[in-house]
Amino acid sequence: MEIYLICLAVALVGGLMMSRLTKLVNLPAVTAYLVAGLFLGPFCLGALQIPSLGFNSLDQVNGMKIITQTALGFIAFTIGNEFRLSQLKATGAKAITIGILQAVITTVLVDVVLLLLHAFFPSIISVPCAITLGAIAAATAPAATLMVVRQYKADGPMTKLLLLVVAIDDAVGLVLFSVSYGIATALGNGQVSVTAVVIEPIVEIILSLGLGSFMGFLLDRVERFFHSRSKRMTISVAFVMLTVGLSMLEFEVGGIHCGFSLLLVCMMTGTIFCNICDTSEELMNRVDDWVMPLNVLFFVLSGAELDLNVLAQPVTLIVGVIYILARSAGKYIGADLSCRLTRQPKPICDHLGITLLPQAGVALGMAITAANLPDGALARNVVLFSVLVYELVGPALTKRSLLAVGEIKPEGKTSARRINAN
């Protein structure tokens, strides 16, 4: 136990110290935390096998999965705060249109490119693997995007639209992946399962939205019993942790596998809560401050679990580069077309797609499932490689795009200590 505590402390301090170095080259703190995780991971300092100096194995990193899952729950809960009715009335329909179209266009483009690769080089990638990777390409990481927005206090039409689109992207990606994975499995065993392709994805979304709505209503009711700010914040934190735990449950009903999407459940909890609780804005801000160390750990651990062994596999690198180029083009073209369709200003049309490039937890979760395919190891390794690339460059590109549309103020030299002293 003491080894884990020391490792977590080293991860926090290492992430924060790295953020001071990356600030010198104007990179977002998220990138610093991920790089710190790589250095502390089992392929750098951890490889020295010195107890407490970094993470000595991927198993040790995976042993802290509860921390990353909890942090992801809080991030999703915070994103739910963006779905306020007043804001949805203004941009909700447009955000839904953009969220769905850009995800579908990305999946189709990646599918076409990888299927062409299969047509010319069938020994490199199979049809089931190509179809599955196309669906995984739709997923966007909300965590990195939200951290960049918070760090630079970005605000404006594109920032508001971006947070909504990223949230919607998870639900769309879930459906696309479930359908594609069902088709890929059918191609492998010769029969199509309607339950796996159609029913189970719909059931998962309905259950997730239902559980999230119930927890949001319940949180509002329980909050009313407390008047102290610290106690209200504590009960909010407890409810998010409870919601994360409940979203991990799985069961079967009538032969149908039932589960929940952690991101959807926690986003729905935050959405319901922020729309029915009068003091939700203040509580959300207080919870954000409380979970900041948890968020740092989330990204450091995410960097530590990136498997650098994939860099030694030529086939993975070839397919990975093609996947990254096709997905990047899909996100940019999809966002541009859908923004033009919904009549967004030109700066948003030009830059929104770049902010949708980060990819992490959701995609990795899909890749683990895809590993069950006959050549699923390739799909998993390609996603690991793409996550390594996207997580290191994605936050910086998001910052650049938000700067380009004028929604991030240029950084000054003001000290936080001086501001707090005043």
Image (tube, rainbow, N blue to C red):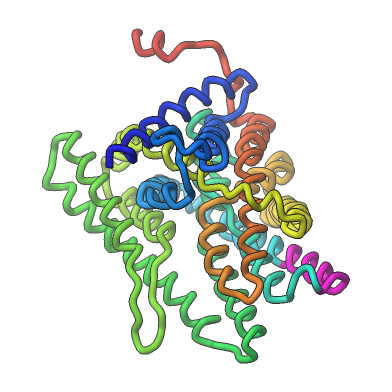
Q: Residue furthest left?
A: 225
Depicted 267 relative to depicted 409: above or below: below
For this rendering, which residue is in front, 7 or 303? 7
Taking the view exactly as shown, the residue that stands out farthest to the front is 49
Residue 379's x, y, as percent?
65, 64
Report the label total: 0
Is 9 situated left or right of 136 in this image? left
In the image, residue 200 sits, relative to residue 48, either above or below, namely below
Where residue 243 appears, x then y in whole percent?
A: 30, 57
Depth check, front residue: 159 or 62: 62
Residue at 38%, 51% (x, y): give it.
63
Magenta residue span:
108-122
Q: Is residue 151 visible?
A: yes
Q: Quadrant of the N terminus?
A: top left
Locate residue 179 relative to residue 270 in the image: left or right.
Answer: right
Is residue 121 on the magenta stretch?
A: yes
Q: Report if residue 319 lies within the magenta region.
A: no
Instruction: Work out which quarter of the rendered image holds the C terminus and state it.
Output: top left
Q: In the rendered image, is residue 86 in sight?
A: no
Q: What is the x, y in percent for residue 361?
A: 51, 53
Residue 117, image quadrant = bottom right
Q: Residue at x 47, y 30 (%)?
A: 15
Question: What's the residue at 37%, 36% (across, down)?
Answer: 8
